Image (tube, rainbow, N blue to C red):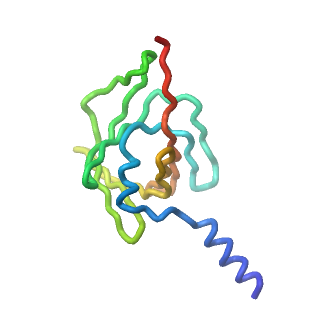
């Protein structure tokens, strides 16, 4: 009986994820730099330097994400390519639904704060993002 109780407690701790509220969605807006990816088998891939950064612009649970490239003067180089994003909120769960002319896919938001974003894709890969550090050589 003690083992069953211990298993229940451990599984609830390990499976904890943040309840996402509509007010939290505004945290998505802005720049996000990938920090690491956790693979389903437990392996991790760390990112020390990123050539591209994700930029989100969301209003009323709809918007876009695009890749931008940080420049040495502190600006970002961008192009016209972007992914349309809509957000589905249901019972504290939030899903990012992406759509381009070529594909559509989903990612579940596991954690979202002012400085941290964790999403899980349909292949059970977890992407951990942080706000990029500002830099300039001016």
Quadrant location, the N terminus: bottom right
- Please tell me which residue is depicted at 40% across the width and 26% down the height of the picture: 69
Q: How many marks?
A: 0
For the view shown, which residue lies furthest in the right direction?
2
- Please tell me which residue is depicted at 38% across the width and 39% down the height of the picture: 30
Up/down of 81 relative to 61, above or below: above
For the view shown, which residue lies furthest in the front direction?
23
Q: Relative to 30, is 41 on the left or the right?
A: right
Up/down of 11 relative to 68, above or below: below
| Residue nearest the viewer, comparing 18 with 119 | 18
For the view shown, which residue lies furthest in the left direction?
101
Q: Relative to 114, is 104 on the left or the right?
A: left
Q: Which quadrant would residue 45 be assigned to in this image?
A: top right
- Please tell me which residue is depicted at 47% across the width and 47% down the height of the picture: 114
Up/down of 120 relative to 116, above or below: below
Up/down of 14 relative to 119, above or below: below
| Residue 98 in the image, given as x and y percentages of width and height | 31, 50
| Residue 54 in the image, given as x and y percentages of width and height | 40, 37
Q: Relative to 81, is 73 on the left or the right?
A: right
- Please tell me which residue is depicted at 51% across the width and 47% down the height of the picture: 116
Q: Relative to 127, is 13 on the left or the right?
A: right
| Residue nearest the viewer, comparing 9 with 99 | 9
| Residue 78 in the image, given as x and y percentages of width and height | 32, 26
Q: Which quadrant would residue 71 be assigned to in this image?
A: top left
């Amino acid at each position: 009986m003690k083992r069953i109780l211990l298993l229940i407690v451990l599984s609830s701790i390990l499976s904890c994820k943040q309840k996402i509220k509509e007010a939290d969605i505004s945290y998505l807006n802005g720049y996000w730099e990938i920090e690491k990816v956790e693979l389903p088998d437990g392996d991790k891939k760390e990112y020390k330097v990123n050539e591209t950064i994700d930029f989100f612009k969301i209003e009323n649970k709809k918007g876009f994400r695009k890749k931008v490239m940080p420049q040495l003067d502190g600006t970002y180089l961008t192009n016209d390519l972007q992914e349309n994003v809509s957000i589905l909120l249901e019972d504290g769960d939030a899903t990012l639904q992406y759509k381009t002319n070529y594909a559509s896919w989903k990612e579940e938001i596991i954690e979202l704060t002012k400085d941290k974003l964790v999403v899980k894709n349909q292949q059970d890969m977890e992407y951990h993002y942080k706000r990029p550090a500002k830099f300039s050589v001016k």
